[in-house]
Image (cartoon, rainbow, N blue to C red):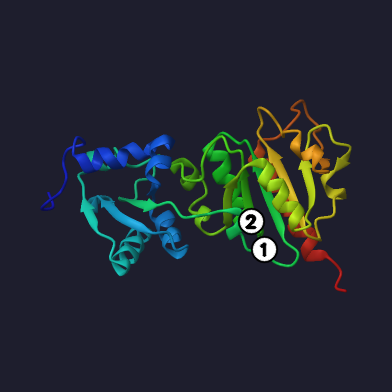
Amino acid sequence: MIPDTITSTANPRIKSAAALRERRERDARRQFLIDGAREIARAIAGGIRLEVAYVCTPLCRSEDAQAALEGLDVLGVPRIEVAEHVFANLAFGDRADGVVALATMPDWSLASLELSASPLVAVVEGVEKPGNLGAILRTADAAGVAAVIVADGGTDLFNPNCIRASLGTVFTVSVCAAATSDAVAFLAANRLRIYAAHVDAELEYTQADFTAAAAIVLGSEAHGLSDSWKQAGATPIRLPMLGVADSLNVSATAAVLFYEALRQRRTKPLP
């Protein structure tokens, strides 16, 4: 056993960190956990303030884990060694990289979003499953979406499962949480044309024009989108559904729409 290794899950520091599994605790303390070597490396690259790292050295076998530890050392982030069963109390999922970091929530707001001259913005309203939100962020990163706004979110950006599902891209995409009313006002102020995904829309997604400044709005699978988007003048668009299912998973819908926008923008004729 490594000297000064924490071996009890009842240790106050472990109990305090593990409590951050709950959103209420995260919101109250303005702290969250980052589980995974790649996720920690991307948090470092994204300028997230890391306060301490809980490390189980025997599990840090991968190159990613070693790179994350090096990055933590460069920043001077304190390490706390923990036994494997204690680490399991902090980690999420099946991929154990041997390092979990405790971080301070960044101040991500609509005012902090930086948009290009003709941006593509995604708005995700009311999505409750952190895995879906994380997958959408991962796709937004891959497809070059300028910013993601989480409107009236049923889950939070700092849910550890959201961070894991995003593979840490939550730290590389311009992102924030906001009320739907504020998101609508933000899009209007930036003169973005709004396209809202609806299963019963007449316009197919390939007929939408994503080449100019635009926003793609997606709602939860359970409740869809609020009436705020109809009042905002959003253009409804749909994906064709040729089987018995009447809709796709919201993260799958996001992938189709984001890449259609990317296709249009890459093939847009030069002026």
For the point 33% across and 37% down, the residue is 19
Q: Secondary structure at mark 1?
A: loop
The type of residue carrying mark 2 is Ala
Q: Are marks 1 and 2 in contact (CB under 8 Å)?
A: yes
User: Which numbered disc flags the more N-terminal residue, 1 or 2?
Assistant: 1
From the viewer's perspective, tell me whether residue 8 is left or right of residue 232: left
| Quarter of image, res 201 | top right
Q: Nearer the viewer, residue 51 or 109?
A: 109
Q: Nearer the viewer, residue 37 or 208?
A: 208
Q: Which mark is residue 147?
A: 2
| Gap between marks 1 and 2 measured at Cα | 8 Å
Q: Position of residue 93 (x, y in %)?
A: 40, 39
The type of residue carrying mark 1 is Leu
For the point 46% across and 41% down, the residue is 161
Q: Position of residue 111 (x, y in %)?
A: 60, 58
Q: Which mark is residue 269?
A: none
Q: Is residue 34 above or below residue 85?
A: below
For the point 37% across and 44% down, the residue is 29
Residue with the mark numbered 1: 115
For the point 81% across and 32% down, the residue is 242
From the viewer's perspective, tell me whether residue 140 is left or right of residue 84: right
From the viewer's perspective, tell me whether residue 114 is left or right of residue 35: right
